Amino acid sequence: MNMKKMMKQAQQMQAKMEKMQEELKERTVEATAGGGVVKVVVNGKFQVLDLEIDPDAVDPDDVEMLEDLVLAAINEGMRDVQDMINDEMGDLTGGMNLPGMF
């Protein structure tokens, strides 16, 4: 493969990746914990956009349980976003593993 063709392909891939990064800002995942009593929405930039807690989950005598549920929902949301990014990257790179891209 000649160098000019490789450079053109690299530029095209870079443009596609920049577009994908912009699109990921708009995409969200929703994750829950405790059977849905805690719900979070996380975007493709790993920002928590929304947090909902069912009032029944609020027990002043067991704040630790609520804290654990919030953490579990947020962590699940973060894993789901990473999975979404990995899927998109796999589609973009044709399955090539390009370390350090995200």
Image (cartoon, rainbow, N blue to C red):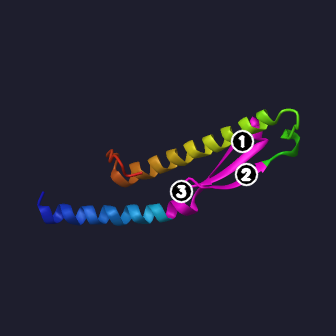
Q: Real-space Cα distance between discs 2 and 1?
A: 8 Å
Q: Real-space Cα distance between discs 3 and 2?
A: 16 Å
Q: Where is residue 20 in the image (x, y as percent from the top left)?
A: 45, 61
Residue 99 placement, left or right of 57:
left
Q: Quadrant of the N terminus?
A: bottom left
Q: Position of residue 79 (x, y in %)?
A: 55, 42
Residue 45 is labelled as 3
Using the image as rendered, state which of residue 65 and residue 81 is in the foreground: 65
Q: Are marks 3 and 2 in contact (CB under 8 Å)?
A: no
Q: Are marks 2 and 1 in contact (CB under 8 Å)?
A: yes
Note whether 51 is above or below 35 in the view shown: below
Using the image as rendered, state which of residue 59 and residue 32 is in the foreground: 59
The residue that label 1 is drawn on is 70
Residue 51 is labelled as 2
Q: Is residue 100 magenta?
A: no
Kind of residue indicated by mark 3: Lys
Q: Where is residue 91 in the image (x, y as percent from the top left)?
A: 40, 52
Bounds of the magenta segment: 23-52
Q: What element carries label 3?
A: loop
Kind of residue indicated by mark 1: Val
Note whether 35 is above or below 94 in the view shown: above
Count residues near mark 2 (Cα–Cα under 10 Å), then give few for <14, some for 14-19, many for 20+: some
Q: Residue at x 51, y 59 (%)?
A: 24
Marks 3 and 2, the one that precedes in the sequence:
3
Q: Picture quarter containing residue 33?
A: top right
Q: Position of residue 93 (x, y in %)?
A: 34, 52
Kind of residue indicated by mark 2: Leu
